[in-house]
Amino acid sequence: MDEAQKRKAKITRIYNATVKNMQKLGTFREEFETPVRRYSELRVQYDILTDKWYESGCEITEEYTNKSGATNQRKTTLYLALETMRRELMDMENIFGLTPRGLKTIKTKGLEKAKESALDRLLDG
């Protein structure tokens, strides 16, 4: 299996696990399929960049000399990308109800599926 096939398989595993978790929580809807697919792809990209960051020695900052010749410390581009992706993933997990905060928001707004009571099941026969 080549690298592209491995990535696709990993995306599919993450997608399936995410959908399964959302279904358990009662937060999955068909309209979430595309965002969950994007989330799965972003998770794989995040894992790839994380591996590269560890390979580079987990550098957070680097020296940078600007146009006027002043040298400063700045965050590395790799670390900035990881920071941004981490925020995006957390936002998506909140939207999907996969964090305590996100699940609370969904329950508060009444977006979760209503659970059928024993009386409803009895009446439905």
Image (spheres, helix red, strand yellow):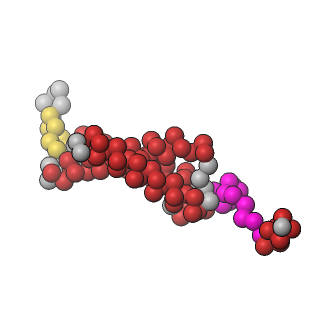
Q: Is residue 51 magenta?
A: no
Quick check: can you spot residue 42?
no
Q: Residue at x 83, y 67 (%)?
A: 125
User: In the image, is 112 to the left or to the right of 58?
Assistant: right
**Magenta stretch: dominant SS?**
loop
Residue 105: x and y in percent read 62, 57
Front in this rendered view, residue 4 or 51: 4
Residue 46: x and y in percent read 32, 47
Front in this rendered view, residue 79 or 28: 28
Label total for image? 0
Residue 29: x and y in percent read 61, 49
- Examine the rendered structure and indicate whether residue 52 appears above or below residue 69: below
Quick check: can you spot residue 71?
yes
Front in this rendered view, residue 56 or 44: 44
User: In the image, is 89 to the left or to the right of 72?
Assistant: right
Query: Which image quadrant for residue 17?
Result: bottom left
Quarter of the image with the N terminus is: top left
Q: Residue at x 54, y 53 (%)?
A: 96
The magenta segment: 106-117
Front in this rendered view, residue 87 or 123: 123
Q: Is residue 110 magenta?
A: yes
Q: Residue at x 73, y 61 (%)?
A: 114
Q: Residue furthest right?
A: 123
User: In the image, is 36 to the left or to the right of 77?
Assistant: right
Residue 98: x and y in percent read 51, 59
